[in-house]
Amino acid sequence: MDLAAERQMRDAAMAWLRDREANGTTAFSRRDFFSYLGRDIRFMNPQTGIWKPAGWRGALSISTVYTPESSTRPYEDADIGLDGLGRYKWRGLDPDHADNRALRAAMDHHLPLIWFLGFAPGRYAAVYPVYLVKEEPSSHQFVVAVGVIDQLGFLDVVYPSADIEVAYTMRETKQRLHQAPFRAAVLDAYTCRCAVCRFGHAD
């Protein structure tokens, strides 16, 4: 698929999410899809954490399942590194797995993705846009930054905190990855209504 067309479809996916959130939807599921030019496109892989729609060059989304505190996650996703940025694990250990190639293509073409973070069984908060800014093969993972940034600048930065834009992205990444699932869980539990006055407005 032409990259320009794929970017338009990604924009349509994120516009769908923004519209739903503006109307009080804070929780999403693996069954959700958006429509583009008469075609229905799902947001998430029905079974695994990495999703690349047919014909696309790079992955559209990554997801991290909800895991109770007493359990161990199958992948240690959503960890924050010392650089303040997120980490997302490869699928398995094979760098040439199709899912890992899909992530690498998104990184190489600087394509925006959606990160779905589980906050309850089958329910996810959406964080977007996120960018894969670097790969760490020895740890079998990608480095994830939240927001619109100059991805190329990350690759050669030694002391990220010295740069204002990068420092902002670090703070934004940590804040949104930690707060998005909590916010979604609270709004979902109270059906987007104030617990005191019952005013119903998600914002």
Image: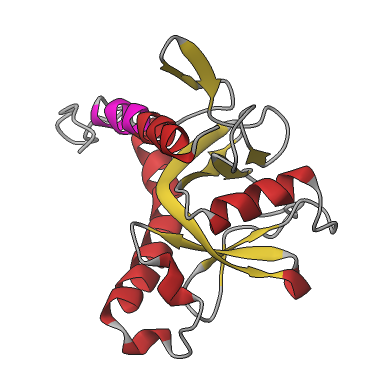
Q: Quadrant of residue 10?
A: top left
Work out whether residue 56 or residue 32 is closer to the camera in this orientation and state it: 56
Residue 4 picture location, percent across and down? 41, 38
Task: Indicate the quadrant containing the N terminus: top left, top right, bottom left or bottom right.
Answer: top right
Task: Indicate the quadrant containing the C terminus: top left, top right, bottom left or bottom right.
Answer: top left
Residue at the farthest front position: 2
Q: Can residue 68 be seen here?
A: no
Residue at image coords 65%, 31%: 45
Q: Quadrant of residue 75?
A: bottom right
Left or right: 118 as drawn, with respect to 91: left
Residue at image coords 39%, 55%: 179
Residue at image coords 64%, 57%: 77
Rendered view: 93 above or below 25: below
Residue 182 picture location, percent across and down? 42, 49
Left or right: 154 as drawn, with respect to 70: left
Q: Is residue 24 magenta?
A: no
Left or right: 82 as drawn, with respect to 17: right
Coloration mode: secondary structure
Residue at the farthest top position: 38
Magenta segment boundaries in residue numbering:
15-22
Q: Is residue 21 magenta?
A: yes
Left or right: 121 as drawn, with respect to 83: right
Rendered view: 15 above or below 128: above
Q: Can residue 80 be seen here?
A: yes
Residue 108 picture location, percent across and down? 56, 58
Residue 13 picture location, percent across and down? 41, 30
Number of marks: 0
From the image, give the main secondary structure of the stretch colored magenta: helix
Residue at image coords 48%, 40%: 3
Work out whether residue 39 or residue 34 is closer to the camera in this orientation and state it: 39
